[in-house]
Image: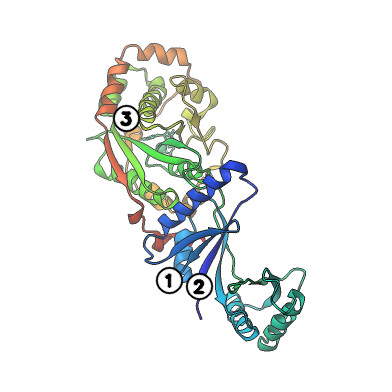
Amino acid sequence: MKYDFMLIRYAELAIKGKNRKKFEQILEKNIRQALKPFDGAKTSRSFGRIFIELNGHEEEKIAEAIKPVYGIYSFSPAVRSESNEKAMQENALWMLNDAFGEQHGTFKVSVRRTDKTYPVSSQEMNHVIGGYLLRNLTDKSVDVHDPDVEVNVEIREDATYILCKRYEGMKGLPVGSSGKSLLMLSGGLDSPVAGIYALKKGVTLEAVHFHSPPYTNDRAKKKAEDLARVMTRYGGRIKLHTVSFTEIQKAIRQQIPDNYEITVTRRFMLRIAEKIAEETGAKAVVTGESLGQVASQTLESMHAINAVTAFPVLRPLLTAEKLDIVEDAKKFGTHDISTRPYDDCCTIFLPSESKTKPKPEKAARYESWLDIEQFVAEAVSAREIQIIDAKDSGINEEISELF
Ligand code: ATP
Ligand code: MG
């Protein structure tokens, strides 16, 4: 026997009124996108659910592909059965065995009858199916209050639908339902995780990466590309803007006092990010900053850095613990790329000493020795733009960690 389709549940309470329709459309589109490699798998919507017609594809493969799609609350593979007792009983038995595997446990049968012309009541059907299951399973018992597994049987006019197994989804909102932001993507651990959290809230992302050739090599740049590629599993294609930062860093090295180099560097990055965000229609900048993690991430530092822009700067990891961020990076599949040993532009140029309480006025005074607008405009216009597509994200090898 085989599953016929996948029933997908989404969080209904979180969305109301007009937004609901838009939310459903975007979610269905994102699911379709994730199903691209599966010829013939089709989606449809009804009764506040999305259905995938599996068309012969294995349910585990489909589950892997849709698992990272934000906005899905949970999903269950299901069988379409003929509405006669024998067919229902056999399908339910097969499904219960599939759900339990080798494990022992308790179950419950819940029958619903949307076809009121069906001659037997739901209550009686519970017994007809439950009794059959008990007779054919030696190590399982019924627990109607707190069963390990529930077999849901819905008798409809066209057919009877049976489902049992349940996969948890990633929750959140479908990517594309909350506007666009620009992620500042370094090669480190934090920024990709921060980006994935933004995706989780439905934000579409573009990304900007700063590098300093020839002081940083191609492998540092490739790290950012590979991270963006993993991120496409959660949010579809990502446009990656790679900005050469060498000239600006050299100027900072020469002109700015050591203890303000980090602050000024970050202020330049943010100015450039703002310009790119404006061009691309992004409404905010996302960073991987986490309060107190390093000298440049004290509140005073963030204040001095943030002073160069009126753009909202979103910091999804602001209050997160480093250990939890590392765990998330492992779960999301970005960890092993982030920990590859190549220096990024900051580690190469920056002094070990830096101020934990920089003043915005002082940073501005030091910067006035540089032609800020010229540097920013040149860096923005010389940037390289790449589209990182979801199809190369290596989804089936690594994503199983999520289960
Ligand atoms: P990460 O692990 O994300 O590199 P971090 O703990 O190393 O963060 P910083 O180096 O202080 O922190 O950087 C703070 C944030 O600034 C990063 O999370 C990232 O969003 C942004 N950033 C830093 N370096 C770069 C870069 N080379 N390109 C793009 N963004 C960067
Ligand atoms: Mg870093």
- Crowding at label 2, few (<14), some or many (≥20) Cα neighbours within 10 Å? many
Identify the mark at residue 57; answer none if there is no mark: 1
Task: Compute the Cα span from label 1 to label 2.
Answer: 9 Å
127 horizontally vs 175: left or right: right
Depicted 94 relative to depicted 397: above or below: below
Residue 40, picture quadrant: bottom left
Q: Provide the residue designation for mark 2.
A: 4
Identity of the residue drawn at 54% across and 32% down: 292
Give how far across and how far down residue 190 sits, in percent.
46, 41
Q: Element type at marker 1? A: loop
Give how far across and how far down residue 4 sits, in percent.
50, 72
Q: For the residues labelled 1 and 3, say whether their Cβ atoms are less than 8 Å apart.
A: no
Give how far across and how far down residue 55 sits, in percent.
43, 71
Task: Compute the Cα span from label 1 to label 3.
Answer: 52 Å
Task: Compute the Cα span from label 3 to label 2.
Answer: 58 Å
Give how far across and how far down residue 224 sits, in percent.
34, 43
Identify the mark at residue 349; answer none if there is no mark: 3
* Type of the residue with mark 1: His
Q: Residue furthest front?
A: 117
Q: Residue furthest left?
A: 214
* Type of the residue with mark 3: Phe
Q: Element type at marker 2? A: loop
